[in-house]
Amino acid sequence: MKASFQSYRLNFKRPGGTSRGVLHEKETFFLELKEGNQVGLGECNLFRGLSADDLPEYELKLAEFCDKINDGEEVNWEDWRMFPSIQFGYEQAKLSLNAEDQILIPSDFTAGKKGIQINGLIWMGDADFMKMQIQEKLNAGFHCLKLKIGTNWSAEIDILKTLRQQFSAETLELRVDANGAFDEHSAPDVLEDLARLEVHSIEQPIRQGQWEIMADLCAKTPTPIALDEELIGIFEKNRKEALIKAINPQYIILKPALVGGFLGSEEWIQLAEENQVDWWITSALESNIGLNALAQWTFNLGNPLPQGLGTGGLYTNNTPSRLEIRGEELWFK
């Protein structure tokens, strides 16, 4: 087997606003495996500024990974726990080696019989921009919206109030993602505000790494809390278990590219279920190569909650895809 990689820059159709700044482009890496006449392609989805493996020597490590394969060495998944995006890309590329027509994991999803319900993502921006996105999603038939918050809380909560006045919690599920924008002093009031509006959950209300404070919030919160960034950089299984037990969140959110690929995510899922913690899957701005594999794997997990999968429509120069959005569901054409 031979391996190689190349970098690729995805350009946003319109800037994506988050509490960490505005995104104009997204760098990623494509890993190619060749074995005889078969070619497998995977995406090592490094997320600059967020991935635990966003290191100066990242490309050197990716080259080292390819060299080991080219030298005939077997890849030991455990040896690459510190590089979850490489694990993620390799898993895809291996599945892709034996795939036809982008079908990596055959199922009713890849047969075009069933779709995956997803949430409609609302990017940060001024009130008019956010309202425009919301109306687009509602018109498309979404029953679950996820709003990025944390830059202007007074304006953001006004938008949430307006939505709740128009749609009951039974009609429209609202999720919010703070990306750690609040602190231990402001977070409790935000959680109370969200509870009054019957918001489903809030992702990462405070910065990660504050286990005691987060545990206290999760114990007292009137609004369910979902851990997201908190999981990043927790590599070993015993540390994952320690985090779950220490914080005891209502939900965890898994981005395989950031938490150890499919195998690493399945470790988290096992530990969550053993501790009565619910979960769902979220993409991390992958290209269609990564999103295709992620969607097929997610479908096979059988989680009934709306998933946080991207649509592949964010970029001007995305890769070809058989994925499409029909209403509020992701389908494989």
Image (tube, rainbow, N blue to C red):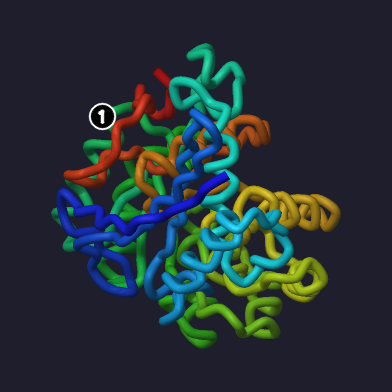
Q: From what the image shows, is residue 292 above or below residue 147?
A: above
Question: In the figure, is residue 18 to the left or right of 63?
Answer: left
Q: Nearer the viewer, residue 16 or 188?
A: 16
Categorize mark 1 by other alpha carbons within 10 Å: few (<14), some (14-19), many (20+): few
Is residue 11 in view from this perspective?
yes
Residue situated in front as seen by the camera: 15 or 33: 33
Residue 116 pos. (x, y %): 51, 29
- Give whichever of 280, 226 is nearer the camera: 280
Amino acid type, residue under disc 1 in the picture: Asn
Q: Position of residue 270 (x, y in %)?
A: 79, 51
Residue under label 1: 139
Image: 282 above or below 202: above
The answer to whether 204 is drawn above or below residue 90 in the figure is below
Q: Position of residue 326 (x, y in %)?
A: 35, 22
Q: Who's the residue at 51% across and 71% down the image?
A: 61
Q: Quadrant of residue 59?
A: bottom left
Q: Quadrant of the N terminus?
A: top right
Of all residues shown, which one is farthest toward the bottom? 185
The percent coordinates of residue 72 (x first, y second) are: 64, 54
Q: Nearer the viewer, residue 208 or 189?
A: 208
Residue 200 visible: no
Q: Which element type, helix, strand or loop, lies under badge 1?
A: helix
* Residue beneath the point at 75% across and 55% down: 267
The quadrant the C terminus occupies is top left
Say whether residue 233 is left or right of residue 131.
right
Q: Please name the residue shown 29% across and 50% down the image.
A: 162
